[in-house]
Image (tube, rainbow, N blue to C red):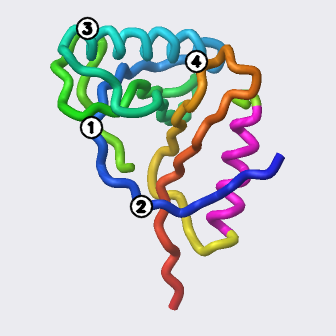
Amino acid sequence: MGYEVELVDLQEQQTAVVRGHVTLDDVADFLGGAFEEVVRTLGSQGSAPAGPPFAQYAVRSDGFDVEAGFPTRSPVEPTGRVTPGDHHGAYGEVAAAYDALGAWLTDNGYRPAGAPWESYLDGPDVAEPRTIVYFPCVAIRHG
C-alpha cells in the first residue's frame, strides 16, 4: 500500500482528552471509552468536537501511555477523566504508515521531534477505515 506523505505546519489546537496507560490488547477498548466520555462531557458543557478523534501514544516497556480525545473550539472544564489538553498541530496497517513516515523523514532531511499521533477519519466499523498519522519533526541542520 502506498502512503501520501506531506509536510504540514499545524497550529496549536485546544483539545478535550482522556489519558491512560494500556497494553496493546486494551488499546481499542480504551479508545472507544475515551471517545465516548469526551463526547458526553462536551455535550454536557454545550460544546461539540471541532474535528475527528485522535490518539497520541508514548511507547513504554509495559504498554503505552495514551492521550485520546477530540479537538475543541473552546476549553473544556475538567470532568471525570476528561481534561483539557492541546496538540501542535486500515487500523491494522497503521504500523506500515509509521514505517513510511520514518523513511520519508530520513530521505528528506528531517528527524522526529515529539510523540506521533493519529487522527481517525472513520469509525472502526467501516470496511476500510482511514487514519491520518502525524509525526512532529524538525529539519536536520548540516554544516
Residue sitting farthest toward the bottom: 143
The spot of residue 69 in percent (x, y) is 40, 25
| Residue wearing tag 3 | 80
Q: Amino acid at mark 1?
A: Gln
Q: Residues within 10 Å of mark 4 (few under 14, many from 20)?
A: some
Which residue is more in the foreground, 59 or 72? Answer: 72
Q: Amino acid at mark 2?
A: Asp
Q: From what the image shows, is residue 104 above or below residue 82?
A: below
Q: Amino acid at mark 3?
A: Gly
Which comes before the other along the chain, label 3 or label 1? 1
Label 1 residue SS: strand
Q: Amino acid at mark 4?
A: Val
* Labels 4 and 3 touching (C-beta < 8 A): no
* Labels 1 and 4 touching (C-beta < 8 A): no
Residue 14: give its label.
1
| Residue drawn at the location 60% of the way across and 26% of the way down | 122
The spot of residue 109 in percent (x, y) is 60, 74
